[in-house]
């Protein structure tokens, strides 16, 4: 099994907060898989530093199981401003800290003393909210569910955000 990250587990390890899924559960499953003969290689990004042609020569079958790491951007005025981040840039940092890794200060996404606004719904939005609360990186947290973020729904969500942050 080839894993592009420095530890096996992909989005389970770095995308899901520790409070929702304790990482020792991943380790337990990995030990079981190792005992069954699965070999793991980290820092192995297929198509980048592991060539597909090499895999084809060495293996009879290949299964590519990529996680959903590409965010859906919002093309709205102000999107380019400093301090606006995607969830999958924010969430993995705390999971890395929980693993004992250091996040370089210039790369750290922290919102200490600031208001946190989360646009989006579902588990990822809730994870961002809980992560901000858990680190104490907020003065007030607002979650805006814009599930089908299109047309009027998005405009109403943005109006709610604008109203809330000016209060």
Image (tube, rainbow, N blue to C red):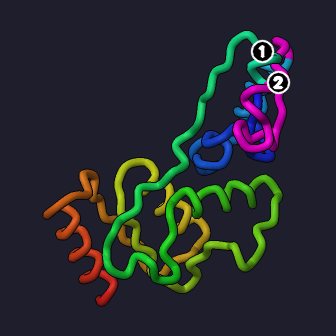
Badge 1 crowding class, 10 Å Cα cut-off, few under 14, some 14 to 19, many 20 or more, is few
Residue closer to the observer: 153 or 56? 56
Label 1 vs 2, first from the N-terminus: 2
Residue marked by disc 2: 31
Query: Image point 59% across, 58% down: which residue?
Result: 91
Query: Image point 59% across, 35% down: which residue?
Result: 66
Segment colored magenta = 35-54
Is residue 75 located in the magenta-colored stretch of the structure?
no
Magenta highlight: main SS: loop
Element at label 2:
helix
Side (left or right) of 91 relative to 97: left
Query: Image point 31% across, 64% down: which residue?
Result: 144
Count the labels in the image. 2
Which quadrant of the rendered structure holds the N terminus? top right
- Note whether residue 126 is visible: no
Which quadrant of the rendered structure holds the C terminus? bottom left
Residue marked by disc 1: 59
Residue closer to the observer: 114 or 11? 11
Q: Position of residue 73 (x, y in %)?
A: 40, 62
């Amino acid at each position: 099994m080839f894993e592009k990250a420095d530890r096996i587990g992909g989005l389970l390890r770095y995308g899901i907060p520790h409070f929702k899924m304790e990482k020792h559960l991943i380790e337990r499953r990995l030990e079981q898989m190792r005992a069954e003969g699965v070999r793991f290689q980290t820092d192995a990004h297929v198509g980048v530093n592991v060539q597909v042609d090499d895999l084809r020569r060495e293996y009879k079958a290949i299964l590519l199981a990529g996680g959903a790491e590409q965010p859906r951007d919002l093309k709205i005025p102000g999107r380019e401003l400093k301090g606006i981040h995607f969830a999958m840039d924010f969430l993995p940092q705390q999971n890395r800290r929980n693993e004992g890794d250091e996040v370089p200060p210039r790369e750290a996404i922290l919102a200490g003393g600031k208001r946190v606004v989360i646009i989006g719904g579902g588990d990822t939005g809730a994870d961002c909210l809980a992560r901000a609360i858990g680190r104490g990186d907020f003065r007030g947290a607002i979650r805006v569910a814009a599930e089908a973020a299109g047309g009027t729904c998005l405009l109403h969500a943005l109006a709610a955000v604008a109203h809330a942050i000016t209060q």
